[in-house]
Amino acid sequence: MNPHPRRFVLAGLAAGAAAAALAASGCASVPARSWESRLSGDAIVLLGEVHDNPAGHRRRLEVLERAFAAGWRPALAMEQFDRERQGDIDSARRERPGDAAHLIARATGPGEPGWDWALYRPLVELALRHDVPLIAANVSNADTRRIVREGYGAVFGAAERAAVGLDAALAADLQQGQERAIDAGHCNALPAALLPAMARAQFARDAVMAALLRARNGGVVLIAGNGHVRRDLGVPRWLGASGRDVVSVGFLEAGDAATPAQAFDAVVRSPAAERSDPCARFRAAPPR
């Protein structure tokens, strides 16, 4: 597993001809008015992101601010907080209610890979301002590395594996699709033998996120990378039949032809962020 939290930003760089054709055809973004109205009641709403794209973050925040202004009060589950830090989040809220900086400092460790908290602090502030639950939703990088090396049993006991659905056989399309997405997200430079183990770690993250969403009464929003919110490969595949409205929205970059728009209920596109070529380091490495 790529230890950097901006994993899967690279997915847009490995466009195949089929994906490009899909994006150029009838996969246009759904108008906001046709899906934002579903952000109500006990809906499970999954809002994606390209982790380092500020424009996409702003547009997603605007969506949530409109939903809160309309009276919706969902819990907010965030990939950016590891599940072990839930107690720190809750303690920080008791200690200094409304202080987003204090909460972020308490719930992130100095040795953990960093997120750009300038992009996420407004979401924390939104949750605190409206006093809604804030849920640590991620499996830590330390645990995912153990899962890659040793399997699910290195992190989850038998009962937890069963509770989140990691004890069942996977559909072939999910296994193959996740391996392709991970390979594309790493510039098609990974050893093929590593892909099943890395997919296993991604399944663990998605399954845990899905279990947390299912457990909430009332509405809940997941803030996570676009790969996690895809209906074909991500958290929705692990939710099961909840009887609740599930809304998946990809916040993609303009020009991303590799991520199929039909993998989401709706797509919001923003200009691509400026960044150095993330595949350069792979081209400098010996061929696999």
Image (cartoon, rainbow, N blue to C red):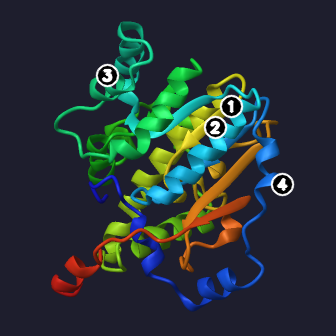
Q: Which residue is at 21% across, 87% downward?
A: 287
Q: Mark 4 = which residue?
A: 34
Q: Which mark is residue 65?
A: 2
Q: From the viewer's perspective, is residue 122 above or below residue 206?
A: above
Q: Mark 1 = which residue?
A: 68
Q: Amino acid at mark 1?
A: Phe
Q: Mark 3 = which residue?
A: 102
Q: Earlier in the sequence, mark 1 or mark 3?
A: 1
- Are there few (<14), some (14-19), or many (20+) residues within 10 Å of tag 4? few
Secondary element at tag 2: helix
Secondary element at tag 1: helix
Q: From the viewer's perspective, is residue 258 above or below residue 44?
A: below
Q: Amino acid at mark 3?
A: His
Circles 4, 3 touching at the beta carbon (< 8 Å) = no
Circles 1, 2 touching at the beta carbon (< 8 Å) = yes
Circles 4, 1 touching at the beta carbon (< 8 Å) = no
Secondary element at tag 4: helix
- Is residue 133 among what the camera can see? no
Q: Earlier in the sequence, mark 2 or mark 3?
A: 2
Q: Amino acid at mark 4?
A: Ser
Please name which of the two marks, 2 or 4, marks the residue nearer to the observer: 2
The CA distance from mark 2 to mark 3 is 22 Å
